[in-house]
């Protein structure tokens, strides 16, 4: 497969026609080699318009969902971002292409170690990884300008809201174990503003402030 050509086709056929237009996001998708984050036996499906298994009953999200979540954080380049659910590391790499610093937390040791290795091999120096309970965030480096949660919760973990800066943006799938809606929270001095981006389906966010 010509992965460079496949990346270009993904952007032109899956992302742009669905309304993804942020130039920084599109540039990141054209550059990041998605195949490096996927088991070799699924390489022939790398740039398909669907999620793929990455082991440990986890998945790498559909490219459009990754783009939608990234675009709606409104990243400009100087932000400090927290990602909950490193998974394969692909979403981490997309954000790392755009922002100054990204901190990412993964509870599954094997996935965290594999993602860290891949990100290092690709030369990302603005990523810090941690193995732990993502529902509790990563307080040491807070507050964050943006937080992305790549697993589904019944409600937003309170720890994450506390670690979000005023005027910061947090995007997370909210719902039950079977279906969710993608919700953006904007933290204001007098509360939260929410925007609903429609239905989605993610693996559950497990931890102290998530699913047990």
Image (cartoon, helix red, strand yellow):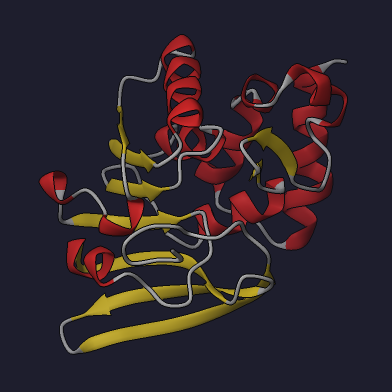
Measured as percent of width and height from the top left, residue 36 is found at 64, 19
Measured as percent of width and height from the top left, residue 60 is found at 65, 41
Q: Quadrant of residue 30?
A: top right
Horizontal side of 164 relative to 194 (left or right) equals left
View extreme (bottom): residue: 190
View extreme (front): residue: 212
State the residue in front, 205 or 102: 205
Q: Quadrant of the C terminus?
A: bottom left
State the residue in front, 97 or 135: 135
Asked if one can make out residue 21 in the rendered structure from this viewpoint, the answer is no
Measured as percent of width and height from the top left, residue 17 is found at 80, 57
Above-or-below relation of 106 to 177: above
Q: Quadrant of the N terminus?
A: top right
Measured as percent of width and height from the top left, residue 80 is found at 25, 45
Q: Residue at 41% across / 34% down in the picture?
A: 96
Horizontal side of 12 relative to 38 (left or right) equals right
Q: Residue at 31% across / 47% down in the picture?
A: 81
View extreme (top): residue: 121
Q: Residue at 44% across / 32% down in the picture?
A: 97
Horizontal side of 29 relative to 86 (left or right) equals right
Q: Quadrant of residue 148?
A: bottom left
- All told, the count of numbered labels is 0
State the residue in front, 105 or 122: 105
Above-or-below relation of 75 to 125: below
Asked if one can make out residue 85 in the rendered structure from this viewpoint, the answer is yes
Horizontal side of 183 relative to 181 (left or right) equals left
Q: Residue at 11% across / 45% down in the picture?
A: 140
């Amino acid at each position: 497969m010509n992965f460079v050509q496949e990346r270009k086709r993904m952007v032109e056929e899956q992302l742009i026609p669905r309304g993804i237009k942020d130039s920084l996001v599109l540039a990141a998708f054209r550059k990041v080699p998605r195949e490096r984050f996927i088991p070799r036996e699924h390489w022939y499906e790398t740039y398909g318009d669907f999620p793929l298994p990455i082991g440990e009953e986890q998945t790498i999200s559909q490219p459009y969902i990754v783009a939608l979540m990234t675009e709606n954080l409104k990243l400009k380049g100087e932000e400090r971002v927290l990602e909950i659910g490193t998974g394969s590391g692909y979403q981490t790499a997309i954000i790392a292409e755009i922002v100054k610093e990204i901190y990412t937390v993964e509870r599954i040791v094997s996935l965290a170690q594999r993602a860290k290795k891949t990100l290092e091999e690709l030369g990302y120096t603005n990523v810090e990884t941690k193995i732990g309970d993502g529902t509790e965030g990563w307080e040491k480096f807070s507050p964050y300008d943006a937080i992305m949660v790549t697993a589904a919760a019944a409600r937003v973990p309170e720890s994450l809201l506390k670690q979000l800066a005023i005027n910061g943006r947090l995007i997370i799938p909210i719902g039950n174990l079977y279906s969710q809606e993608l919700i953006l929270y904007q933290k204001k001095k007098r509360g939260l503003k929410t925007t609903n981006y429609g239905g989605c389906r993610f693996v559950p966010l497990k931890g102290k402030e998530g699913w047990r």
